Amino acid sequence: MKNFRTILTILSVVVLFSCKKEMPISDQQLSVNSNESANLAADSKWQAAFLSYSGNPMSRVIKDKFFIKGGYARIYNDSIKINPNNYYRTQFRLVIPSSIKIKGDSLNFEVGLKNPLNSSSIPASVGREIDVYIKGETNDAFIANTSTSDVSPGSQEYALMRIGKTVINNLPELQYNFEDYGTLILQTFNRGLVAYRNDAYVKGLGYGNEKLIGRLKEIGVIFQGSGYIDYIKLYNSANGKLLMSEDFNTDGQSTIIWY
């Protein structure tokens, strides 16, 4: 099943990245005080990975100075020489500093993005999937959007939502072509996972017997091919408070703002 393959893809990337061990904390929402701001600027950096299918070139981690340029984040041939026959993925993730305490179960993870047909040499028949995910101390959540007429009818199986081990797939609502910039939102609220596209409700999935996500530890976006990220924002879904923003407007440098 594609959903398990996708999950394994995400888990395999963890091996590429190095992370700091974090101390257990409560999942209360806290703001950052001014004394921590300098350390946060140093600790909060976007990390990217090139996930190779054919090994030409090999999978590797890429620093922000090579994938943030021109007002967006993207890995492409100017970043790394990619063989046209390599059905690769590109991943962008942020490890949340341990001093930032965000409740993963009351979250809007909003991404401005696109993954047009001409964004890579991957044939349209392979698809242009876009995955957004969050990881917490006790659980994680995942949404996969696939393209529509550019892929085989069976690709609808790949359009899915997951919270922990609870999965729903074959979702026509999550088949959409992000040919131009649009917004994809992963929301957690009231023990439910919800997908929004361009501020419109798409689909929901209840937690059921799944554990709470707990304190947010990581957020990420994965493209099939060389997708673009225009901006990312985190909000508290319970009160609408802005928690974090990144507009990728400083070439070669993460410019994350915590609120």
Image: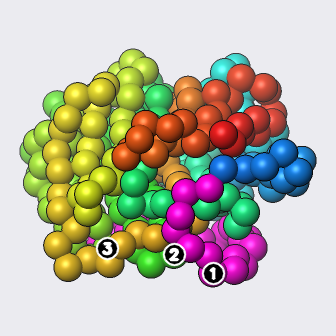
Dominant secondary structure of the residues highlighted in magenta in the image: loop
Judged left or right of residue 84, residue 61 is right
Residue 117 position in % (x across, y down): 38, 27
Q: Is residue 35 magenta?
A: no
Name the residue located 28 percent from the left edge and 32 percent from the top edge. Answer: 197
Start and end of the magenta stretch? 1-30
Q: Cα distance, mark 3 to mark 2?
A: 12 Å
Q: Is residue 133 above or below residue 19?
A: above
Name the residue located 69 percent from the left edge and 80 percent from the top edge. Answer: 23
Q: Is residue 119 above or below residue 1?
A: above
First in residue order: circle 1 vs circle 3: 1
Tell me the residue that label 1 is attached to.
24
Q: Amino acid at mark 3?
A: Gly
Of residues 166 and 172, which is closer to you in this image? 166
Residue 244 position in % (x across, y down): 61, 40
First in residue order: circle 3 vs circle 2: 2
Name the residue located 75 percent from the left edge and 73 percent from the top edge. Answer: 20
Q: Amino acid at mark 1?
A: Pro
Tell me the residue that label 2 is attached to.
137
Number of residues whose C-alpha sits closer than 10 Å to that of mark 1, classed few (under 14), some (14–19) or many (20 or more):
few
Report which quarter residue 182 is drawn in: top left
Number of residues whose C-alpha sits closer than 10 Å to that of mark 3, classed few (under 14), some (14–19) or many (20 or more):
some
Number of residues whose C-alpha sits closer than 10 Å to that of mark 2, classed few (under 14), some (14–19) or many (20 or more):
some
Q: Which callout, 3 or 2, points to the residue nearer the camera?
A: 2
Tell me the residue that label 3 is attached to.
164
Q: Are marks 1 and 2 in contact (CB under 8 Å)?
A: yes
Instruction: For mark 1, give the secondary structure.
Output: loop
Q: Cα distance, mark 1 to mark 2?
A: 8 Å
Q: Is residue 113 visible?
A: yes
